[in-house]
Image: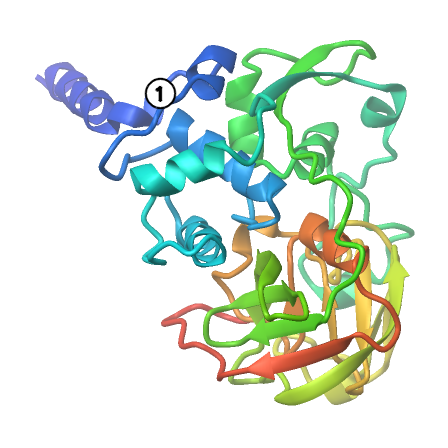
Amino acid sequence: MIRFVLFVAAALALASSGTEAAKLDPTAVNQAQFSAGEPKGVSPAILKAQILLDRARFSPGLIDGRVSENFTKAVRAFQAANGFPSDGKLTRETWDKLMATSANAALVAYELTRKDVRGPFTKHIPARLERMAHLPRLGYHSAMEKLAERFHVSEQVLRRLNPGIRLKKVGTKLLVPDVGRGDPPAAIAGVEVDKGARLVRVLDPSGKALAVYPASIGSDEKPAPSGQAEIKRVVHNPTYHYDPDFAFKGVKTKRPFAIAAGPNNPVGSVWIDLSIESYGIHGTPEPGKIGATFSHGCIRLTNWDAEDLASMVEKGTKVTFKGETAEAGDEQPQ
């Protein structure tokens, strides 16, 4: 009887997963067509749309093939930029316009290099900031994490695109999203941090968005600033410096300390320093949490979006803060 119940439960779970087990291969994704309705689970069509949005600099954050809040915000921004009703729904009109932005395949083959597989990697990174300070580098945990970040995709989807492949041999071919964004805009008018929408926008002189990124922005404990600021400098591969005056929850030491550089550093792979003391726009070691958690006052983007933004700004670029930090239920500062 117990075996029968387990069998029925497994069958029901498999049936209810439906699109969760959708096939992810070059044909399924590259030739995906528009379909009305909101798919559940990982969808080849949503994966394709996320890749094209990412290329067009309307970032969906972590590419995972799912309809999420960040995906909806990216669609809404793309619609607004193209004069469509901006409801965030992937309509036929929006799909057709998005498909017209690029003729290149969404998924392409990639060959592993020695640098991909050799590391160095940091297999264990403690959760507490004080303990992170003892590490010589905050590198990627593994080749899988490194490649997933390079192609802006979740590790789960990268594994599904490449079942059974081990990331140890140079020359191994992988199936990956083509997220080449092309050259950044030659000149921008400024950067807008929308605290309510949890978005960072790069604007041209007319106010049109040239790039839009999901962001984690401030918290009740340490809200993001208001008004205007300027960019002071851009620091790639930054070291993180903790000041006891920050008084972050969970940090017990009363002494300052530094955490070594690396993509899993608390501020990620790049720090864009603002003219407001101790505030900046920066990357993150946890791209899947962008837009879903608060920050310690700063503006947190995925590493790849922070690096893309860093390529567009310079000393003196204006940064305008708009609105108030959004409510986020039970979410906690990251």
- Tell me the quadrant of the picture where the C terminus can be found: bottom right
Identified at 61% across, 89% down, the residue is 226
Identified at 55% across, 44% down, the residue is 62
Asked if residue 157 is positioned above or below residue 236 in the image, the reply reads above
> Is 229 displayed left or right of 55 in the figure?
right
Residue 235 can be seen in this image: yes
Q: Which of the two residues, 293 or 1, is positioned nearer the viewer here?
A: 293
Identified at 82% across, 73% down, the residue is 273
Asked if residue 83 is positioned above or below residue 29 in the image, the reply reads below
Please provide percent x and percent y for residue 181: 69, 40
- Tell me the quadrant of the picture where the N terminus can be found: top left
> Is 51 displayed left or right of 83 in the figure?
right
Identified at 65% across, 81% down, the residue is 320
Please provide percent x and percent y for residue 39: 28, 34
Question: Callout 1, which amino acid?
Answer: Ala
Residue 66 can be seen in this image: no
Question: Within the image, what quadrant is residue 177 found in?
Answer: top right
Asked if residue 226 is positioned above or below residue 215 in the image, the reply reads below
The residue singled out by tag 1 in the image is 22
Please provide percent x and percent y for residue 309: 73, 58
Asked if residue 319 is positioned above or below residue 310 in the image, the reply reads below
